Amino acid sequence: MIDRIVKFLASPQFALTCLLTGVGLVALAAFPLQFIAIPGDQIARMVTRGVPFVALYAALALATLACFRKRWKAIPRLVKATVRLPNHDTHVVSRIAFDDDRATRALRRVGFRSIAVTQDRVTGVRSRFGPLGNHLFHSSILFVVGATLIGMVPGGASVSRVRIAEGESVEDKAEAPYGDTGFAESIPVSSFSVENVEGTSVGRRPATLRVTVRDAGGQKRLMTAGVPWVPNPVTVIAAEDFGLSATFSIVPSGSVAPIASRTVDLTDHGFKTTEYFKLRASTGMYYRIGVKAQARPLSTSTPAQLRVSVAKSKKPSGMWRMIAAPQTMTVGGSEKAGDVSVRLVRTAPHASFRIQRSIAGPLALLGLLLAAIGSLLRLAMPRTEATIERAGTEGTAVRLASDVYRTAARLQARLVRAWEEDR
Amino acid sequence: MSVESAWVFWMLYGVATVATALGSVAFWGPRWARTSGIVLLLVAVGGFIGTLGSRWMIAGRPPVIGTFENTLVTATLIVAVAVAVACFGPPTPQPPLPGLIAPWALVVLAGGSLAIRTPLPIDAGGRTLIGYFHALVGWLDFALLVGSFAAAIGLLLCRRAADDAAWDEALTRLLGLGFALLTLTIASGSVYSFILFGEWYRWQIVETASAVAWLACATLLHLRLLHRWQGRRLAVATLVAFLITVPAFWIWAVYPTTYHYFDAVLRLR
């Protein structure tokens, strides 16, 4: 019974059914949702993690496993040096009498190796390991499906995003997360600090980005938008964007101690958009600071002139009352706003980092590599076998067969030429 | 764009286009004309490479942004595939396969001429080696699949059943290479997506179209290799699969809600 099930799962018909079902499911389920611009994560939740897709993943994995069970014993035979393909009809008869030395030379000239000589026959094999590509390619499906399943397990993957300004370290930002998951989540990366951020913009996106960080061991790491830092196989730290950060402090009248200070990103939402942040004073009052860049910092070297407004409220969600008209400030400057004074402590370029932990990452990468190598090995370098043998009393037959494409007309023509010219 | 650079660009563009058209026609003629067809297509490839180099100088970055530039790259590779088929591919009888492949470069160029031609800026995410590799392999793959499509048309037009085997081999080899490069395109795109966005696969229209294209080509190869489909049946299946595959390569040019979208929608002037 088990054998019959395995035989069914390993059959070409079942593989074909899986593939056609995949085409149908993706085309019918995902396309319409994408055309009406539903975000990808919603589509993933609604469709691709739905029962039909999970069943398809399972079917693909089962079919691949069954194929392996059925065919793995054949692998040594597939890569054997000796000729194993049946001779197809495609052969050419030459009038030149058979000569094994001449045949060996002809085969070598056209790139055939593993040459075997018998009394009336010389054989050669080209791209002997091509059939292995088939197994590498199909095993990649298992890796990719495995990586997808591991990625679905809680704790299997996490992403945090954090902005760190020049001179600051990860620890400085540990309590100021942003993004969809908190930075407090354990990230298996030791401390790093940002040394230098250089960037230029195109529209609202970075045109160039170079970030230098120093890791816990004191070693410098350079990151660009296309070259992340990979501290260990399951962690990737990528620089995604840059911007200008400003640090403010608020000091109550008659005091020297700031009640709080906060850093605000001035470039996250675009030019001349006011960024707000709220602070709570010891008096119980809430202050809301609005900051707007006067000129969009098109590069990290742009000096900052900021427009700052201050509002006050008894509750963080209550009505905000402006207590000072917007004022232009530069670094080191201080402005009185009602019963507090607001000081612009510093501005510095920051980089936005994505810190990503993915247990399945190496598995997915291995799967993709195997898929690419396997398909190239199998389809771009198919195993080809050639036979030059005695045909009748005066002639010689030149036969050639490819295990993927059956015929190889141009190679056969080259072999015949090599045989006939024998230079 | 300076007047001199634009002049050089359009001159090379014109030379390459005319050489492609003449080369395509030459393959339909006698044997000596076929040789001149190869020469003309080589001139076209040289002209297109010069056009791309000139565009690179004008834009100050590799010409990989926007529909217009991508059609230039694609046309170059389609003509290059036609030359490779003429020189190294399985010899096909009339109608000639290179003569069926090369005209598609002109179709692609015509599509590109409807798009905006102003050099667009590139962002930091685009300035990556893996990004350039992904684009180059993708367009080479498209050129190979155009080759298999042309071979399918050739097989259907072929009147002598004895020639079917030659067409069959040409079709299957181009399809096999196309599938291998489609896999490499998706794999490199996946790594690129992970570097830029932290996701191996994003459910966006281009990726969905690529998944469908990959499954369609895999189905076709299974039909050929395991179920031994060949001849006209395989040719019809290839035509259907190619139509399913085209959106994976071009949907971004007409559908703006994707991060693959690089320029304005194809604009009919």
Image (cartoon, rainbow, N blue to C red):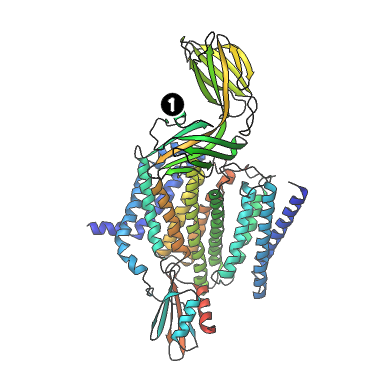
Residue A177 visible in this rendered orientation of the protein:
no
Residues A124 and A344: in front is A344
Residues B157 and B102: in front is B102
Whether B72 is drawn above or below A188: the answer is: below
Q: Residue at the spot x=48%, y=65% of the render?
A: B172
Q: What element carries label 1?
A: loop
Q: Name the residue under label 1.
A: A175
Q: Residue at the spot x=46%, y=47% of the render?
A: A27
The residue most toward the front is: A218
The residue most toward the right is: B3
Q: How crowded is mark 1: few (under 14 residues within 10 Å), some or many (20 or more)?
A: few
Picture coordinates of residue A32, whole percent (x, y): 48, 41
Which chain does tag 1 point to? A
Picture coordinates of residue A68, whole percent (x, y): 32, 59
Residue B130 visible in this rendered orientation of the protein:
yes
Total tally of numbered discs in the picture: 1
Residues A281 and A149: in front is A281
Picture coordinates of residue B246, whole percent (x, y): 54, 52
Whether B167 is drawn above or below A323: the answer is: below
Picture coordinates of residue A216, whole percent (x, y): 44, 37
User: Is A332 left or right of A412, judged from the image as shown?
Assistant: right
Look at label 1 and name its amino acid: Glu
Q: Residue at the spot x=53%, y=76% of the render?
A: A414
User: Is A70 left or right of A229, judged from the image as shown?
Assistant: left
The residue most toward the left is: A1
Q: In which quarter of the image is residue A6?
A: bottom left
Quarter of the image that includes the C terminus of chain A = bottom right
Quarter of the image that includes the N terminus of chain A = bottom left
Q: In which quarter of the image is residue A70?
A: bottom left
